[in-house]
Image (cartoon, rainbow, N blue to C red):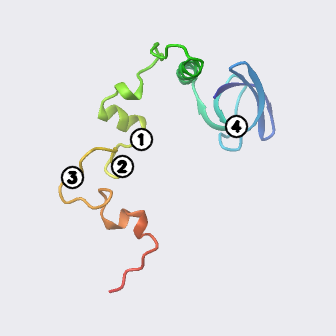
């Protein structure tokens, strides 16, 4: 959940978000300032985000919470949902851009490409397999 830093202690920060106040571990995000936004999961700050991203995540959480309570979940999420994105937008969202990026599920490999389009060495199933000449 997105939370905003309200106080800082060595290795921890006090954060507020979605009606809660928590003391979270900050080892994964580095130095912080009061007012910074964080994505928090299971008591740990996992990522530093900006206020716009915090609002997007809060909008998505509001839709999920509403759906769980039986309300219509077809409202505006406040951002483009992945189900409405193009393949290129999904690649950018998931960091799957560039020559060594893994393929998107359901897309076709380039002709002659190995698994998963990176050749046999890229196959994690072959990682421990020893080749004999």
Task: Residue at 33%, 57% (x, y): give it.
Answer: 116
Q: Is residue 92 left or right of residue 29?
A: left
Residue identifier under label 4: 31
User: Is mark 3 in CB contact (under 8 Å) with mark 2?
Assistant: no
Q: Is residue 99 left or right of residue 81?
A: left
Q: Residues within 10 Å of mark 3 (few under 14, many from 20)?
A: few
User: Is mark 2 in CB contact (under 8 Å) with mark 1?
Assistant: yes
Residue identifier under label 1: 95
Name which of mark 1 and mark 3 comes first in the sequence: 1
At mark 2, the secondary structure is: loop
Name which of mark 2 and mark 1 comes first in the sequence: 1
Q: Give x and y (percent) for residue 54.
A: 58, 23
Mark 3 and mark 2: Cα distance apart in space:
13 Å
Residue identifier under label 3: 110
Q: Give x and y (percent) for residue 93.
A: 41, 34
Q: Quadrant of residue 43?
A: top right
Q: Residues within 10 Å of mark 1 (few under 14, many from 20)?
A: few
User: Is mark 4 in CB contact (under 8 Å) with mark 1?
Assistant: no
User: Is mark 3 in CB contact (under 8 Å) with mark 4?
Assistant: no
Q: Nearer the viewer, mark 3 or mark 2?
A: 3
Task: Residue at 32%, 86% (x, y): give it.
Answer: 133
At mark 4, the secondary structure is: loop
Name which of mark 2 and mark 4 comes first in the sequence: 4
Mark 2 and mark 1: Cα distance apart in space:
8 Å
Q: Nearer the viewer, mark 1 or mark 3?
A: 3
Q: Quadrant of the N terminus?
A: top right
């Amino acid at each position: 959940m997105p939370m905003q830093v309200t106080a800082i202690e060595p290795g921890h920060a006090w954060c507020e978000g979605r009606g809660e106040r928590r003391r979270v571990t900050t080892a994964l995000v580095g130095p912080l300032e009061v007012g910074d936004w964080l994505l928090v999961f299971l008591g740990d700050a996992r990522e530093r985000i900006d206020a716009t991203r915090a609002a997007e995540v809060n909008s998505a959480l509001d839709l999920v919470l509403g759906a769980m309570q039986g309300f219509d979940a077809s409202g505006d999420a406040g951002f483009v949902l992945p189900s409405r994105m193009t393949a290129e937008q999904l690649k950018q969202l998931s960091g799957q851009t560039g020559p060594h990026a893994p393929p998107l599920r359901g897309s076709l490999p380039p002709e002659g490409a190995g698994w998963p389009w990176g050749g046999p060495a890229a196959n994690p199933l072959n990682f421990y397999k020893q080749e004999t000449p």
